[in-house]
Image: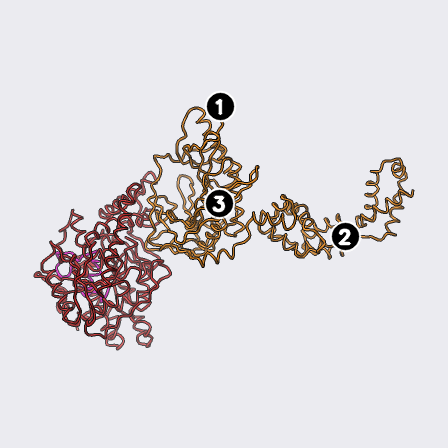
Amino acid sequence: MSSFFELSLKGLQTGLRDSSFTSRELVTDALERIAKFEPHLHAFLYIESEPALRQADEADKRLASGDKQEFPLLGIPIAIKDVLTVEHMPATAGSKILEGFIPPYTATAVKRLQTAGAIVIGKTNTDEFAMGSSTENSAYGLTHNPWDKSRVPGGSSGGSAAAVAARLVPAALGTDTGGSVRQPASYCGVTGLKPTYGRVSRYGLIAFGSSLDCVGVFGRSAEDVAIIFEIMAGPDPSDATSSDTAVRTTKFEKQDLNGIRIGVPKEYFIEGMQAEVQEKIRAAISQLESLGAKIQDVSLAHTEYALPVYYILAPAEASANLARFDGMRYGPRVNANSLFEVFSKTRGEKFGSEVKRRIMLGTYALSAGYYDAYYGQAQKVRTLIKQDFETAFKEVDLIACPSTPRTAFEIGAHAGDPISMYLEDVFTLPASLAGVPGISFPAGFDELGLPIGMQLLAPEFREDLLLQTTHIYQQATEWHKQTPPTFDAEKI
Amino acid sequence: MAIKYEPVIGLEVHAQLQTKSKMFCSCAVVDSVSETPNNAVCPVCSGMPGTLPVVNQLAVEYGIRVALALECQVNPVSIFARKNYFYPDIPKGYQISQYEQPLAENGKLNIKIAEGQKTIRVRRVHLEEDTGKLTHLNGSSLIDLNRAGVPLLEIVSEPDMSSVEEARAYAEALRDILRYLEVNSGDMEKGVIRFEANISVRPEGTDVLNTRVEIKNLNSFRALERATAFEIQRQEKVLEAGGQVDQETLGWDEDNEKTYSQRSKEDAHDYRYFPDPDLPPLVVDKAWLERVTATLPELPRAKNQRFMEEYELTAYDAGVLTAEKAVAEYFEAALKKLPENISPKSLANWMTGDLFSLMNQADTTVADLKLSPEALAKLIGLVAKGEINQSTGKTVLVEMFSSGKSAAEIVEEGGLKQVSDEGFIADLVKQILGENPDAVESFKAGKETIINWLFGQVMKKAAGKANPNVVRAELDRQLKEA
């Protein structure tokens, strides 16, 4: 075998348990692939080699001693988006303002994976503070799409999506505030889950829009994603917004979609979207139907307002969330003559332009005299968007639609035009505002060979339904098994 | 003719809640004066990225206690909000507070004033977190985050006070309540209660609302009183001179005893309050309210009233004995052990007189007394039964206070037991009269007050142990017979 990463996460679990290979071999392979492909991809902001190998040796000892039942991820390397903290590893959030910051605490989601035996081998690239749809806003350089180096991997979790697509790691964590897991999953041809808001603890997730931020997972199949998701999910006393609702374990026994009602919202098939995307998503919906699902039209009437609502609420929250980066306690400080000059110079020089744009937008939306017209009004419309979903889910079990209007765009395509960049997220924003879970998975390719992502949305806390349905689709199709040509294991 | 002015005063009181841990993290609440700086700090209260606040339930409960004691309506759902501003002492760049929908609203507090009592309305009671502490030293500034995130309760009154005295009475009454509820130590020197005064003045008897100023960071009753008085005078002078008071935020210069401008209206902050998305709405259900109500202690005013009615104490005694919860509890504990024939008034006299003066001299509190309420009751019992006389009793109290020994022990060891034996006393009286024929002559000549001097001589001879009633009776008898 040329690379272990031809195997699924499940396959890796079995192989390690059967002693077909060791964790050291696995981690070594991952590090070798990273060394080989990173110069072309730049998916990582930080790579941890030696400590990862030491952990692999420990995992191998445990595996040999038979002490492995409680550690489902024992010896398996994963990557973490650099907006999640891992004790003793740098956490930059893709920003110069956190350069050199090493947090003394680990995000709950990551901690749970480590407790299950996973080995964190690195932190992946992200748009600065997860603000962006292309990973071009990283202060540490952009990430390339493994399917086409001249294109973006999507964002903001572009590093994690690219790392999984290029088979550098079997799974990686991302975060999704307005589509930052589903959109890059779609662009990179991998499976990406954004759980229900509150399903996975946000503790240790460097906040962007606190009422929207979700920790999500990238994997190569629904089955792999489910393994990671179920370990991370569940209440956390350190996050007051985490939910006590019991986590539903996905049952993968079912082979068909009999009895599943899937709604198709007309608002997600719009003018200006790429024809091939529309075509392939319609074909995928037909496939779901042929697997037994009942397909029907639904309406999510307030969809068109999701973008303006999101670009008021998320920046408003961000303007407060990012106030702590003042150069006083951690991160770099630009010295000046007065206190407020230190604040403004540090923030002025260390934040990137998109971050500053959103801080200004958000500050404005919360200002005296404007609050009601912007923040207050946006909250009301957010409620309407949420109600759209509640109404739709009275009639259907799931909603199927495209993840993005187009396939991955070329690097620099939206430079200088933030609105056109924001439009890349129109299909992912509504579910974020509603707090419902969504998954994106490969459903075909366009004529350039770029992956097309299908999005399924479910009612709150029904990630099991998303994962199960995606799994059934993936049993019947081969899209998710395609490897980016450049990163095909045979070509190492 | 000069116009007479009256002040209109409202107070915002920030009271630290004496919980073990901070408002939104598990860091210990430490003494902000003595603790090493930055010793009680964690990623949450130092505002590190990715960390989240979790509400301290005990702090909420303390807040509810105060709200109920002030007869507020506790909101079934209240909202934590972010108050945004930049300063090095607020690590997150915002303070978590409450804005719309505070913990409780519409309460009141009755205060004692010269003319009787007055009701001051309480507008709102809300929870928030304290800031850190900055120290400026040789051109640089040091920050201590021990206090950052300590729970605070902000109690905002309506502008119902119309004199410095009323403002002080309100502040003191509130302090007493906070201590009674055991939610705040009342230790003003440690800054656990801080005041902000809103002040305007207007022609007396009108209901004009003139421009008000806000004086921040008044950390003692004295500062509150002086600053308020200063500001009222300053505003009166401005108005008398035909000027206008500017709306501004003032500081209080303790050393020079004057207010100074910190911020004008134009520089006023826009705090951009909005609901904190990290904290779900705070729900206080009926069951919780009932639980807290059940544990609510009797409050100072109710206790004061009861002491006057039930124990027939004077307003003065009741006031002194109920000013502190611990003192009132000591009184009632002693009362339980007191023989039935002794009046509560007599116990009150022992406490407010001798015991308090001993405590004052030694600068000690009821909590530190070596003398238990039972021991005090026994001492009073001994005096009442005549086993020792009143003045011996006082001497014994001094000894009990310093050594903690029981009255019986001290009486036994010192041989202080009162002598009531009539034969023995008759002999003493006879002896004294024999030694002082001049005095006896004076008495006979009509100078009856000389009897007090003779009484003193007898008591002196008896080393204070003779029963004074028997001595007086015997003196009377022998003098008349002489």
Q: Based on the displayed image, in which of its 4 quarters is residue A232 positioned? A: bottom left
The answer for how far apart the CA atoms under marks 2 and 3 are is: 50 Å
Q: Secondary structure beneath disc 2?
A: loop
**Counting residues from the N terminus, which is met first, the one under dot 2 or under dot 3?**
3
Q: Secondary structure beneath disc 3?
A: strand
Residue A98: percent from left, percent from top: 29, 51
User: For the magenta stretch, what is the residue range?
Assistant: A145-171
Residue A165: percent from left, percent from top: 18, 64
Q: Which residue carries the number 3 mark?
A: B108
Q: Secondary structure beneath disc 1?
A: loop
Identify the mark at residue B2; answer none if there is no mark. Answer: 1
Identify the mark at residue B37; answer none if there is no mark. Answer: none
The answer for how far apart the CA atoms under marks 1 and 2 are is: 66 Å
Residue A78 appears left or right of B327: left
Label 1 crowd (10 A; few <14 / some 14-19 / many >=20): few
In this rendered view, identify the residue nearer to me: A86 or B75. B75
Q: Which residue carries the number 2 mark?
A: B388
**Counting residues from the N terminus, which is met first, the one under dot 1 or under dot 2?**
1
Residue B250 appears left or right of B451: left
Q: Which amino acid, mark 1?
A: Ala
Q: Are marks 2 and 3 in contact (CB under 8 Å)?
A: no
Label 2 crowd (10 A; few <14 / some 14-19 / many >=20): many
- In the image, the chain rendered in orange is B
**Shown colour of chain A:** red
Would you say residue A146 sits in the magenta stretch? yes
Q: Write down the chain letter for disc 3.
A: B
Give the residue drawn at x 64%, y 54%: B370
